[in-house]
Image (tube, rainbow, N blue to C red):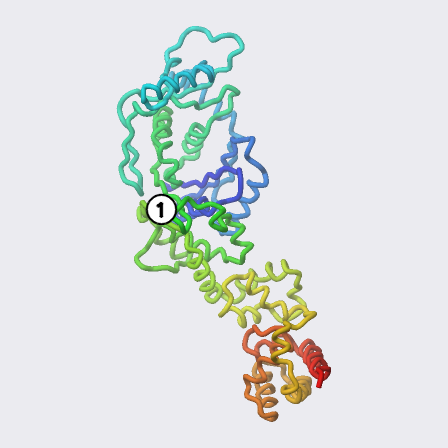
Amino acid sequence: MTVRTRFAPSPTGYLHIGGARTALFSWLYARRHRGTFILRIEDTDIERSTQQAVDAILESMDWLGLGYDEGPYYQTRRFDRYREVIERMLAAGTAYRCYCSREKLEAMRAEQMARKEKPRYNGCCRDRTDPPRPGTRPVIRFRNPSDGEVAVNDQIHGRVVFDNSELDDLIIARGDGTPTYNFTVVVDDMDMRITHVIRGDDHLNNTPRQINILQALGATPPLYAHVPMILGPDGKKLSKRHGTVSVMEFEKEGILPEALLNYLVRLGWSHGDQEVFSIEELTEIFDAAHVNKSAAAVNPEKLLWLNQHYIKALPVAVVARRLEVYVRRIGLNPENGPPLTDVVEALRERAKTLVEMAAACRCFYADFEHYHEEAARTHLTAAVLPAFEALHARLAKLEPWSVAGVHEAVAAAAEVHGLTLGKLAQPLRVAVTGGTVSPPIDATVALVGRERVSSRLGRAIETIRRLPG
């Protein structure tokens, strides 16, 4: 059997990390078993579905690197197929037309609740043979088996049994002819030969209904794995109030896709005590059976830890390519300064996000207007003026321009003028960056470049000379 999994989001908003985790699990399962991963857009909710949401889903999948082998398929383009199957079911007697009005259904529900019964459709149109009233538009209901049970052998929750007597005859097509979710999912899974369905456990109650429809159509149900939801740090259902929940919002915050994938796979799945996994490793070891039954809570600090790990561990060229996007977003031209690979080498040990790294490299690609006020007052003083003047002359003639050469020049200027390297390094940092935070001073000066360093050091010298007294 060739494994075929699917990810089937509804395009009614951004791709939530809960959906992204489901996509990841489905993708990994297909990759591990050398199977096929399918993307299906469930856009039958025409009022709420938007092209913007579709684009956001596709963008998120691409950014995460979760390539699909087939699709994207769109349910709105399959309405003829759904109508064909409904006609077949009506002819076979596995579906029937229901003419009950909304008022009648509401009265039925009220009577059942008054008797303390579970509200459900009572099947009054199941065997109806009289012609409908003119002008009525019936819904189509599935004729659910009235006895027996449905067993869902879930890969995560184990065997879950449902009595058919508890399942009413659900609507599979509305009065206007549009198909409903539980029906379109069944037809799609059947037509696309889906063998394994990995989805949120909020769908577990839909599963027995879908199995019954599949069996009525003569199809073999797939194997199911219902993944517990993701919770916020407070143990409540994850939502915007807990912070970032959209995949592309994480991208905007400077999170690497490798870090987010690693983070998501560990929300409810484990492999011993291991925390860090490459995507190649996951495709060899992931198993849905090892997903926990209980819900997992997000931990933003863990994500930042993983992101910093990947910033340090990924090849410099990879990080530099990703960093370029963020550098350009803040209005900097990475061609107007040192190679981004050199910048990454200098900044990667401390930066937790690419946004933070981009902000830290501003001084390498653009001039600053003002010094940090407190930093200038503390460090740009008459005590460092002679050393600054000497260093300005040394750096102007430095050949070759390198980190080692800069280090030697700074150390020599400090020694000649009776300063420790540290006593000169911080004033020099303020002079060439405008503030007090940067990589080691020799690397910082080398990256800023000879021309900018000469101009900025000259500016600092003039600033000191203009100080009163």
Residue, x 38% and y 16% (percent of image)? 93
Q: Position of residue 160 (x, y in %)?
A: 28, 35
In this picture, is 468 found above or below 203?
Answer: below
Which residue occupies 37% across, 26% down?
213
Left or right of 213, for residue 443: right
Q: Quadrant of residue 145?
A: top left
How far across and down, in percent of the image, does residue 407 sit?
57, 84
- Can you tell which quarter of the image residue 262 is in? bottom left
The image quarter containing residue 358 is bottom right
Which residue occupies the foreground of this view, 194 or 439?
Answer: 439
**424 and 46: which one is in front?**
424
Residue 94 appearing in the image: no
Q: Is residue 190 left or right of residue 384?
A: left
| Crowd around label 1: few <14 · some 14–19 · many ≥20 (10 Å) | some
Residue at label 1? Answer: 295
Image coordinates for residue 329, horizontal then vertical, percent: 63, 58
Image spot of residue 409 (x, y percent):
60, 87
- Quarter holding the N terminus is top left
Q: Amino acid at mark 1?
A: Ala
Residue at 66% x, 61% y is: 331
**Left or right of 2: which side holds 391?**
right
The quarter of the picture where the C terminus appears is bottom right
